[in-house]
Image: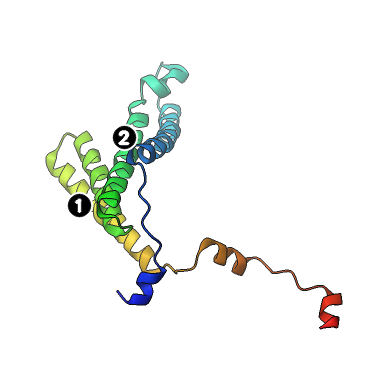
Amino acid sequence: MSEEAEVNTPAFEPKSSIQEASRIGMQAAVVGLVLSSVQNALGTHSHGAMGVVTRTGGTIGFFAAMGAAFKFTETYVANERQKHDALNGAAGGCAAGFLAGVRSRSLPMAIGGCAFLGAAIGTFDYTGQLSGSTETKDERRKRFFKSTPPPLVEAASE
């Protein structure tokens, strides 16, 4: 890495693994609830509306567990390494993929899920860092929005 790139990278700020995992786990549980609702609506059964929880409720817990496992592992690895890079995402993806394979009760599926999801998320993070700019959020905002022109009175007096 060049010296210029090292100067522009922000300092590492550790995050709470438990707090981040809880936040993402809750968001993933909402996605699982939506998917469980769709499964319940499309299936024929006599459970009624409670079938979202009783019949297909495992989907909610599975999505919550995958999201929490991903974010906990990603944040924990980042805190240990004190870096934000693609390896953190790859480790989180591996944990989530392993969990998906364990759900199918197959160790080869767990290892394959770890390899596939870890590689996919790691590649996604890596390409985002390659094409990403060192521009801050405020600089992007100033560049995106139009700046107001100076008043005509000041322009004429200069």
Q: Amino acid at mark 1?
A: Ala
Q: Which residue occupies 33% across, 57% down?
A: 84
Circle nearer the N terminus (2, 1): 2
| Number of marks present in the image shown | 2
Residue appearing at x 25%, y 54% in the figure: 81
Q: Residue 15: x and y, percent?
A: 37, 46
Depth-wise, is mark 2 or mark 1 nearer the camera?
2
What's the amino acid at mark 2?
Ala
Provide the residue designation for mark 1: 115
Question: Callout 1 environment at 10 Å: few (<14), some (14 to 19), or many (20+)?
Answer: some
Residue that label 2 marks: 65
64 versus 146 height, above or below: above
Q: Give coordinates of residue 69: x percent, y percent.
A: 29, 39
Drawn side of residue 149 relative to residue 137, left or right: right
Residue 85 percent across, percent down from the top left: 31, 59
Alpha carbon of mark 2 to alpha carbon of mark 1: how far?
18 Å
- Is 70 situated left or right of 113 in this image? right
Element type at mark 2 = helix
Q: Going 41% across and 34% down the picture, which residue do you hit?
A: 26
The one nearer the camera, 7 or 141, is 7
Circle 1 sits in a helix, a strand or a loop, which is it? helix
- Residue 76, x across and y down, in percent: 28, 45
